[in-house]
Image (cartoon, rainbow, N blue to C red):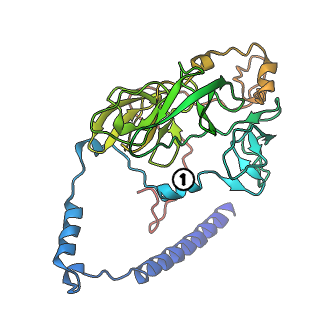
């Protein structure tokens, strides 16, 4: 009886799959557009044809052999104007806090924050585990886009004071010139009273920059230690923005510079990207000892769930099935219970 039912179900599935494959093949053949021979088009000039031939035969530079180029959909002008993410419920900073009210103009006034508890601010769904509780935090608006004059002398600002931030691992420096104040991420040896420069000019010879100065990466000599690196001009600081991190300028090729990130990965960016000279402050951030479980709770970090602790079954508890024994013989292990869909007209494993 069971064999008859199994055979009937197999015939029905085979008939349905055959009809689906045939319909797909018919729709694909009918929707294929006809290709036009662009070489026979009389309206195209010889210069356009030669430019297309040069594009197809263009070879990559040797240093681009193992480089993955990331295309940017938005231009620098759009990013400079709309680089902050606004929504009706406030400014969503990260998965822990939300700034309820965000003004349009820059200000150095501290902002009150609201906790998310690991939930999405719009949908309310749980997105992150081990998030919730903790002390109240104030958020400081860090200016991650150091902009200076494109020509002429650089913009000189004085460091007023160095302070700690509840929402940033590195220390924050309050700088200003004239009637303008702003926050930046402080470098290792930056102190109150120092002068920092900001320039957007790339001179013929490399500049001799001091710690805390911001220049385009193409204006600095090879081997310089930098932080707050942009991915492309106008993006703002993206790489090396945590406490104690830095990137190293390895070499310059044409109009691009290659930097080594803290993860030892190398990236190639345009020479117009802005960077800050030096290493970020609070180097001993990773060596901090909490001392007790309550210290993490005050920071908004909830404890781990005991179900995911490794159990040895000594006391009769084994919540998960043990993994199979790993046979190390230089060949890939053949694990059983592999379900495959085999059909003469539909082969998904080829």
Depth check: give the residue in front, 151 or 285.
151
**Residue shown at 19% from the left, 60% from the top:** 57
User: In this image, 283 relative to 262: left or right?
Assistant: right
Quarter that holds the N terminus:
bottom right
Percent position of residue 243, x then y: 58, 25
Of 284 and 17, nearer the camera is 284
For image coordinates 48% across by 55% down, the residue present is 76
Q: Residue furthest front?
A: 178
Residue under the point 49% across and 76% down = 24
Q: Quadrant of the C terminus?
A: bottom left
Looking at this view, is 7 or 264 the one in front? Answer: 264
Q: Which residue is mark 1?
A: 80
> How far from the left and from the top, in percent, is residue 21?
49, 74
Position above or below: 218 against 76 = above
Can you see residue 269?
A: yes
Q: Residue furthest bottom?
A: 42
Q: Residues within 10 Å of mark 1 (few under 14, many from 20)?
A: some
């Amino acid at each position: 009886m069971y064999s008859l039912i199994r055979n009937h179900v197999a015939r029905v599935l085979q008939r349905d799959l055959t009809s689906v494959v045939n319909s797909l093949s018919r729709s694909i053949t009918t929707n294929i557009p006809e290709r036009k021979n662009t070489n026979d088009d009389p309206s195209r000039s010889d210069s356009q044809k030669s430019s297309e031939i040069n594009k197809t035969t263009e070879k990559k530079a040797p240093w681009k052999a193992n480089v993955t180029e990331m295309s940017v959909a938005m231009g620098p002008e759009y990013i400079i104007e709309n680089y902050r993410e606004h929504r009706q419920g406030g400014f969503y900073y990260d998965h822990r806090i939300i700034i309820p009210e965000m003004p349009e103009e820059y200000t150095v006034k501290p902002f009150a924050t609201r906790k998310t508890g690991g939930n999405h601010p719009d949908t309310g769904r749980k997105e992150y585990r081990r998030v919730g509780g903790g002390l109240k935090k104030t958020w400081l608006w860090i200016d991650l886009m150091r902009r200076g004059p494109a020509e002429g002398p650089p913009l000189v600002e004085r460091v007023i004071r160095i302070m700690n931030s509840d929402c940033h691992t590195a220390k924050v420096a309050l700088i200003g010139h004239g009637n303008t104040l702003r926050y930046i991420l402080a470098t290792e040896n930056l102190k109150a009273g120092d002068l920092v420069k900001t320039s957007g000019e790339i001179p013929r010879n490399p500049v001799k920059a001091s710690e805390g100065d911001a220049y385009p990466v193409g204006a600095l000599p090879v081997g310089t230690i930098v932080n707050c690196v942009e991915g492309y001009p106008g993006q703002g600081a993206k790489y090396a923005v945590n406490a104690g991190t830095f990137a190293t300028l390895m070499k310059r090729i044409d109009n691009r510079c290659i930097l080594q990130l803290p993860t030892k990965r190398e990236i190639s960016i345009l020479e117009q990207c802005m960077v800050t000279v030096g290493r970020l402050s609070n180097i001993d951030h990773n060596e901090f000892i909490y001392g007790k479980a309550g210290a993490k709770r005050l920071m908004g970090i909830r404890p781990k769930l005991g179900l995911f602790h490794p159990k040895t079954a000594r006391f009769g508890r084994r919540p998960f099935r043990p993994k199979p024994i790993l046979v190390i013989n230089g060949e890939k292990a053949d694990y059983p219970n592999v379900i495959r869909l085999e059909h003469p007209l539909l082969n998904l494993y080829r």
